[in-house]
């Protein structure tokens, strides 16, 4: 849903109802962002409350709340009976506002990428080091854009940050993982490693710690034909992570079934 703002065909107010960001906050962010980008200049008229509410199919009170907060900040000026206009004073966004907008952008980007399946891994979370690099590059681009008045640094920073966000992975001290690029490339881990998003895929992470498998209780006859219930626990660990990934479809299930079978043969 979008509505073009009069006098500025290049700028429009859009709503993303799936982002989780309140609608009034989206309106505020887009108006302030349009001013920073030069798409809106002092004196430009915004749609009326009724017009914007009808065109975006939202409650008029939501538009009123957004416009009121922008007026408090000095971004908008309302002339009774005429309309709402961009204020003549220059709006400066403080560091807290910039950081909030950047965090909102990062969160929305990560959520969309995850729902789109841009990474294929059992550990579906983004590593902290990758998130930190994305914030650093995005923040640097945002700062240069504010200083230079050019959006190119922001675009470059976000692109580089997005690449690092999905190319850096971390395996825990006890884990190994296989990297596949049309064919098997090798094992990675423990520690951080690099992959090419979309081109490379990861196998499931293999835990090489000692683990246990429970064998369910079964009735087993003794030598004097007295039935007894036998419980068992099997301790096991993966020694060869490469073979467990490439040669066994589900090695955890294989271990469990093998332990159950071994118990049956020992009767």
Image (spheres, rainbow, N blue to C red):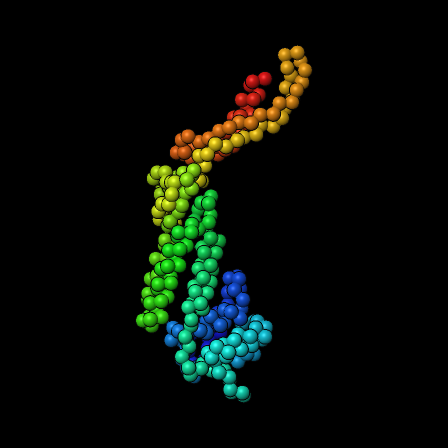
Judge left or right: residue 89 versus residue 21: left
Residue 30: x %, y % from top left: 46, 71
Instruction: Tell which of 58 and 95 is nearer to you.
Output: 95
Residue 37: x %, y % from top left: 38, 73
Instruction: Tell which of 174 and 61 is nearer to you.
Output: 174
Image quarter of the C terminus:
top right
Tell me what residue is drawn at x 42 percent, y 83 percent.
88
> In the picture shown, does residue 245 fall above or below 118?
above
Tell me what residue is drawn at x 44 percent, y 40 percent.
205
Tell me what residue is drawn at x 54 percent, y 87 percent.
80
Judge left or right: residue 184 versus residue 257: left
Q: Residue furthest front?
A: 95
Tell me what residue is drawn at x 59 percent, y 75 percent.
61
Residue 223: x %, y % from top left: 63, 12
Q: Is residue 1 visible?
A: no
> In the picture shown, does residue 56 fall above or below 79?
above
The part of the image, by quadrant, that contains residue 49 is: bottom right
Residue 17: x %, y % from top left: 53, 64
> In the picture shown, does residue 257 fall above or below 71?
above
The part of the image, by quadrant, that contains residue 95 is: bottom left
Q: Residue furthest bottom?
A: 81
Instruction: Tell which of 174 and 50 is nearer to you.
Output: 174
Q: Is residue 28 visible?
A: yes
Judge left or right: residue 239 versus residue 150: right
How many labels were placed on the picture?
Answer: 0
Q: Residue furthest top?
A: 224
């Amino acid at each position: 849903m979008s509505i073009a703002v009069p006098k500025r065909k290049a700028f429009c107010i859009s709503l993303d109802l799936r982002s989780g960001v309140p609608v009034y906050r989206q309106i505020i962010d887009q108006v302030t962002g349009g001013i920073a980008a030069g798409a809106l200049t002092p004196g430009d008229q915004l749609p009326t409350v009724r017009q914007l509410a009808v065109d975006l199919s939202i409650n008029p009170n939501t538009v009123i709340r957004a416009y009121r907060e922008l007026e408090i900040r000095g971004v908008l000026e309302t002339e009774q009976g005429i309309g709402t206009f961009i204020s003549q004073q220059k709006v400066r966004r403080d560091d807290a506002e910039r950081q909030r907008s950047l965090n909102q952008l990062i969160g929305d980007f990560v959520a969309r990428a995850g729902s789109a399946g841009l990474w294929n891994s059992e550990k579906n979370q983004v590593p902290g080091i990758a998130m930190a690099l994305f914030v650093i590059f995005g923040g640097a681009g945002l700062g240069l854009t504010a200083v230079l008045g050019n959006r190119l640094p922001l675009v470059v920073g976000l692109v580089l940050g997005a690449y690092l966000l999905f190319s850096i992975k971390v395996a825990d001290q006890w884990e190994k993982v296989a990297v596949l690029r049309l064919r098997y490339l090798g094992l990675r881990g423990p520690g951080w490693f690099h992959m090419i998003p979309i081109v490379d895929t990861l196998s499931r992470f293999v835990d090489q710690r000692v683990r246990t498998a429970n064998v369910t209780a079964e009735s087993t006859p003794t030598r004097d034909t007295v039935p007894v219930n036998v419980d068992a626990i099997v301790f096991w660990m993966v020694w060869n992570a490469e073979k467990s990934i490439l040669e066994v479809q589900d090695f955890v299930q294989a271990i469990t079934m093998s332990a159950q079978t071994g118990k049956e043969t020992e009767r």
